[in-house]
């Protein structure tokens, strides 16, 4: 699970550590690091420039390195792991949960990952390989194979004795999974039932059979929705034959929710949610260059629309002053609809059955806002230039662009999803192209009809 650290806590320790490192007081830095939780150390690493990071990493206790690295973003994980050989990776990740270890191995080159697997003991290797066989964005990629199972003909007393034989229980254990001899899931036995039931009661009598087991190929975002709807702490994962494969716990689901939110936010700027804020200049520039190129193409396309009406602009110069207003109004209105639709799709609220109602609603909103703001800008334009024609033109263009923006904002994400393009990544660029081009076309087109 990714760390959540109090901002004041982080700032205070970051400042102290930075000052101590600058003064060469490495012993004091090490002592300060030992007072922090592993999540806090990871947060400090992510928030430090490269030079400070390398010093901090060298000062982390060896037994804590594995716990720290699981909290780091993928960029920083790759940077650290790329300098280790297979044996060192095995030592570093020893004791991690199976799903966390699988996540780390997925960041390694395939050759190194295979060497790490070969260096593990057979049981651990089989568990990790099972998780690696599934896509990381599915229930199979999220699950942990470490779970406690019992038979339904066992008594509660036997279950209690069995639990006491364990030194520790798997994290987030709120229930025991009930299976048959073929490992088919039959139900769950909540721990609270174990604690309050008569010891001679059989598991069959107190187990719950009305369970919603998660299919192994279910998308991670849908898994998160189920956890949110049912307030689960953990849930079993099964294959198509009902055989128990493992379980998913709430800490992994929180990561999915957080990553999904970060993805939606960062993708609109063409960035990856795992981008390192302190990555080297060339690496960052290379990643951003492609997105800037795409935006340049869309800007050139909008400029071509303006070029078509160059004679009209030469004739009525103040058109050049007013036309950005139309494009900007459409862009803002479209972004509002686009953001709403992308969020609804992420939460599973939007489907083919209700998309038409959503479109009608957005068109209604665009019409009302269009009348209000088109009227206002037309009055401002008339006062500004004492030209009734320009006030009619800008009002009409604003109205047209707001309606087109509503259509684009509502249907672009749905269309992009159908052709397997991430709406959060491409939606904003596509919308900007539409609203800018249509805004300029409507405004300058009406002006050409009116003045020429």
Image (cartoon, rainbow, N blue to C red):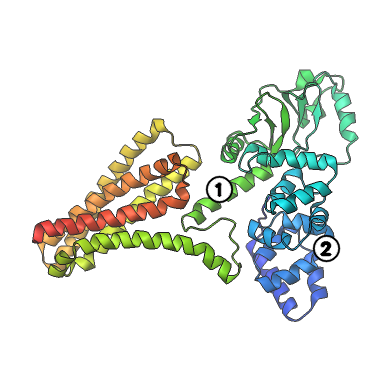
- How many discs appear? 2
Residue 59 image position (x, y, % from top left):
80, 68
On the image, numbered disc 2 is attached to which residue?
61
Q: Return the mark for residue 57.
A: none
Residue 162 image position (x, y, % from top left):
88, 30
* Placement of the C terminus among the 4 image quadrants: bottom left
**Do residues under tags 2 and 1 come within 8 Å of each other at their CB atoms?**
no
Residue 72 vs 422, above or below: the answer is: below
Most foreground residue, 2 or 281: 281
Q: Determine whether the residue tagged by mark 2 lies in a helix, strand or loop.
A: loop
Most foreground residue, 95 or 28: 95
At horizontal 72% and vertical 62% (from top left) the residue drawn is 80
At horizontal 64% and vertical 37% (from top left) the residue drawn is 139
On the image, numbered disc 1 is attached to which residue?
260
Q: Quadrant of residue 448?
A: bottom left
- Left or right: residue 28 versus residue 347 is right
């Amino acid at each position: 699970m990714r760390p959540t650290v109090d901002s004041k806590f982080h700032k205070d320790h970051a400042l102290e550590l930075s000052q101590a490192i600058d003064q060469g007081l490495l012993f004091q830095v090490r002592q300060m690091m030992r007072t922090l939780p592993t999540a806090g150390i990871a947060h400090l690493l992510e928030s430090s420039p490269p030079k400070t990071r390398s010093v901090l990493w060298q000062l982390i206790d060896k037994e804590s390195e594995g716990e720290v690295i699981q909290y780091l973003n993928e960029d920083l994980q790759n940077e650290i792991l790329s300098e280790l050989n297979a044996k060192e990776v095995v030592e570093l990740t020893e004791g991690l949960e199976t799903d966390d270890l699988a996540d780390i191995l997925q960041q390694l080159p395939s050759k190194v990952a295979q060497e790490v697997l070969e260096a593990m003991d057979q049981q651990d290797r089989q568990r990790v390989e099972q998780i690696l066989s599934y896509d990381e964005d599915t229930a199979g990629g999220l699950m942990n194979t470490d779970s406690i199972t019992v038979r339904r003909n066992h008594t509660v007393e036997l279950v209690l004795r069995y639990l006491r034989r364990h030194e520790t229980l798997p994290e987030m254990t709120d229930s025991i999974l009930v299976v048959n001899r073929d490992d088919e899931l039959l139900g769950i036995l909540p721990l609270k039932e174990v604690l309050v039931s008569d010891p001679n009661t059989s598991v069959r009598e107190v187990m719950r059979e009305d369970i919603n087991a998660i299919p192994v190929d279910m998308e991670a975002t849908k898994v998160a929705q189920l956890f949110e709807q049912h307030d689960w702490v953990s849930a079993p994962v099964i294959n198509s034959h009902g055989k128990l494969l493992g379980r998913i716990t709430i800490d992994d689901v929180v990561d999915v929710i957080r990553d999904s939110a970060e993805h939606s936010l960062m993708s609109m700027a063409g960035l990856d949610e795992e981008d390192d804020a302190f990555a080297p200049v060339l690496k960052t520039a290379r990643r951003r260059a492609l997105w800037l190129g795409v935006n340049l193409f869309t800007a050139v396309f909008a400029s071509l629309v303006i070029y078509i009406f160059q004679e009209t602009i030469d004739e009525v110069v103040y058109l050049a002053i007013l036309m950005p207003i139309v494009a900007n109004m459409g862009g803002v209105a479209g972004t509002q609809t686009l953001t709403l639709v992308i969020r609804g799709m992420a939460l599973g609220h939007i489907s083919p059955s209700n998309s038409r109602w959503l479109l009608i609603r957005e068109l209604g909103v665009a019409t009302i806002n269009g009348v209000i703001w088109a009227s206002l800008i037309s009055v401002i334009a008339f006062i500004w230039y004492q030209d009734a024609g320009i006030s009619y033109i800008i009002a009409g263009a604003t109205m047209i662009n707001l309606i087109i923006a509503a259509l684009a904002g509502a249907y672009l994400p749905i269309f992009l999803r159908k052709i397997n393009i991430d709406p959060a990544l491409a939606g904003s660029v596509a919308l900007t192209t539409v609203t800018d081009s249509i805004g300029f076309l409507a405004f300058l087109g009406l002006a050409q009809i009116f003045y020429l």
